[in-house]
Image: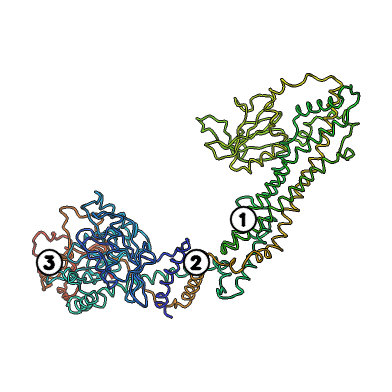
Amino acid sequence: MTTNQGMEQLIPLVNKLQDAFAHTGSTLNIDLPQIAVVGGQSAGKSSVLENFVGKDFLPRGSGIVTRRPLVLQLITAKNGEWGEFLHCKGKKFTDFNEIRKEIEEETDRMTGSNKGISAIPINLRVHSPHVLNLTLVDLPGMTKVPVGDQPADIEQQIRDMIMQFVVKDNCLILAVSPANSDLANSDALKIAKEFDPQGIRTIGVITKLDLMDEGTDAKHILENKHLPLRRGYVGVVNRSQKDIDGNKDIKAALSAERRFFLSHPAYRHMADKLGTPYLQKILNQQLTNHIKETLPALRNKLQKQMMDMEKEVEEFKNFKPDDPSRKTKAMLQMIQGFNNSFEQLIEGTGASIDTLELSGGAKINRIFHERFPYELVKMEFDEQTLRKEISVVIQNIHAIRTGLFTPDTAFEEIVKSQIAKLKDPALKCVELVSTELMNVLRKCSDKMGRYPMLREETDRVVSTNVREKEAMTKEQVAKLIDFELSYINTNHDDFIGFANASQKGVDRGAKKKSVGNQVIRKGWLTMHNLSFIKGGSRDFWFTLSAEQFQWYKDEEEKDKKFLLSLDNIRLRDLEKGFMSSKYGFALFSTESRNVYKDYRQLELSAETQEEVDSWKASFLRAGVYPERSTEKNQDSTSGSSETSLDPQLERQVETIRNLVDSYMAIVSKTIRDLVPKIIMNIMIGQTKEFIATEVLAHLYSSGNGTDLMEESHEEAERRDTMLKMYHSLKEALKVMGDINMKTVQTNLPPPVDNSWIPEEPATNGTPAQSLYASQQSYNRQPSSPARRPPSRPQMGRMAPGPPPTQAPSLPPPIMPSNAAPPIPNRPMPGRAPPSIPRRPAPSQKPMIPQRPT
């Protein structure tokens, strides 16, 4: 396979790949070069494009006709001719008159019908066996005077629109200029010089060669000897208005163009390098050169895309829709994958681990060790209320008698009432784990989206099992609380007993002090105790230790803002505000003092409820307990409390209080230890076993397995698209491998002097040099070299350095008819300028300076 043949196959494959990736919502960034067609309103751009296609399909009219950029992609097809619009996906236009009508209607839909313009392009693909693979952009012609609905700055808007395309390095500029206009001041060449000053991307196109005055021609322009461009010019002959009105076939027009160049005496010697077919050929060669230059990078990009798709396509490579065992195998694979995903999320194993948020086993672990302990502490006794209850129970037990000893019955009654309060937080822990377990199962079943009925049935079977296990777990947890209530073990090794209760004198804050002032937690929180002038809230970096709570400007912990002692500090929940989506809590003092400046409470918030719960658990470790309902009504209850106790009763209350504190520490420790174990055994362990061993049997018993394995329409479409994309990638890489990279590539021509193109529009008083005028001056020069008047030298043609001191005697040069313009004489030193008539000495003749080598 030659390189050109390979390119002819590769370009359609690249287009096919881009379409496939766009269908899946992704992009394949392969920038094929575009050819921007730039010119004035009467330059004949539309005819050049129609000659490329071989069809009459572009709108015609007076004034500005192209009012939106038209991205025209020509694709070589083997059979048939048709067009496709990007805004009409799936619709083929076989009638090119319909294409013209759609272009006009789509233009009017965006710009209106009164000459308005828009920079949003119209994308058209034309498939034909008579075209070469090219992508052309037909841009609006340059205009200066607004008409209709056009804005006053129409010239600048069109310039900006053209700039969007020609500024790209991979965009060739096709500068179209008519032969009967001022070429030196061509708008197209001015734009090309501005954005391509080296002339690397610019190709000149001269139209309307057949409309030049008799006796004039553009031979020296087309030979690139006069007004040169680096890539030169290509002359074309388009259909005249009479031919268009008479519906002259473009094929006949191309034949007439060929005859014109072969029969014209000025062009017949270079007819093979003129005309629309030659222009197509050099443009296609530039496209081929660009792809050859980018071929290594393109190959690497396609290989990377193929490797990324390899895993997804693996299961589809040997897909056989008619295989009867396919659905059975697929069901086994889906259930096995479901089981593996569940184990990975719970156990934290596997290759894919979420790096953004906690999920699965990590969240359940947080419930066990942060949320559950916090809920237990919230239900713990309040000191004042507990002492009152103990006093009432002791007095009721003594009744009419005066008690000399502390009754152990009072201890049992108070302990049982406190143990019963632990049942609600234990059951709540079961519910939280059940909710998280359902989220894990739902996340695992998302991978069954390919089979919606199988996913729905699997969710139903597994969810039913989880609900059953939840009920069993709650029943077991309730039994655990009943076990604790059934027998109060006062012989426990950790229980202090009656003998030590009266002598305990324990400072209940000693536990907190004994751990030292170690740092418990650090992190960002939002403080809301700020004035509205400062924004109302602000984020700070907080550090929590066993004795104090302090915050800084940032995590560097250099700029300390405040330090709060945790003595007599409690924590309460804050309701979610109407204007805030954050979850919050507040710190306050039980002594009714200000905790921060003039504020009675310090209001803090975090982004998620999980983060707030984690901070609450950390405050528990620091000895900051949550607010209880009895504390809210402390003032009202204090008035209705009984009178002060007598010394004997007070000692009995203190003894029972110490005994209850010691025994409840044992019970709480047991509950914190056993409830997570019960949940792990019944809910999680048995659910794992159920998924691994029984789900498949339940699915088969629930109905027809064939119906469960019916694919969704979206999944079947995605599979087909992915397989097409994968095979297209393989085919493209194979074509690249077969391309002969040793084929000679067209080299870039050497640079030329293009300073003849003005930077700014010509002002009044500056003579305009038109192509017509320049050719007329060439053709009307006298035939005798001796009488030829001196002309202005071209830049870059003279050799630098001072003129010679001696004039050699040379005969006048004989110029051939097809030679370049003559080189003017340079006056000798000491001689007057040519404008002053002076007869030279007989022994001296005018000197002709030599050209540089």
- Residue 339's place in the image compared with 783, above or below, is above
Name the residue rendered at 56%, 72% in the picture. 317
* Residue nearest the observer in this picture, 74 or 181: 74
Report crowding for label 3: few under 14, some 14 to 19, many 20 or more residues within 10 A (C-alpha). Answer: few
Indicate the quadrant where residue 277 lies.
bottom left
- Residue 442's place in the image compared with 535, above or below, is below
* Residue nearest the observer in this picture, 594 or 791: 594
Q: CA distance from mark 3 to mark 2?
A: 78 Å
Looking at the image, can residue 798 be seen?
A: no
* Residue nearest the observer in this picture, 559 or 242: 242
Quadrant of the drawing holding the C terminus: bottom left
Callout 3: SS: loop
Callout 1: SS: helix
Looking at the image, can residue 687 be seen?
A: yes
Disc 3: which residue: 789
Disc 2: which residue: 717
Q: Which numbered disc, 1 or 2, marks the residue that appears first in the sequence?
A: 1
Indicate the quadrant where residue 107 lies.
bottom left
Disc 1: which residue: 442
Q: Position of residue 42 (x, y in %)?
A: 20, 62
Name the residue rendered at 39%, 69% in the picture. 290
* Residue nearest the observer in this picture, 766 or 498: 498
Q: As shown in the figure, which amino acid type bears the numbered disc 1?
A: Arg
Q: Position of residue 228 (x, y in %)?
A: 25, 66
As drawn, is 15 to the left or to the right of 64? right
Q: Are marks 1 and 3 in contact (CB under 8 Å)?
A: no
Indicate the quadrant where residue 215 lies.
bottom left
Q: Are marks 3 and 2 in contact (CB under 8 Å)?
A: no
Q: CA distance from mark 1 to mark 3?
A: 94 Å
Callout 2: SS: helix
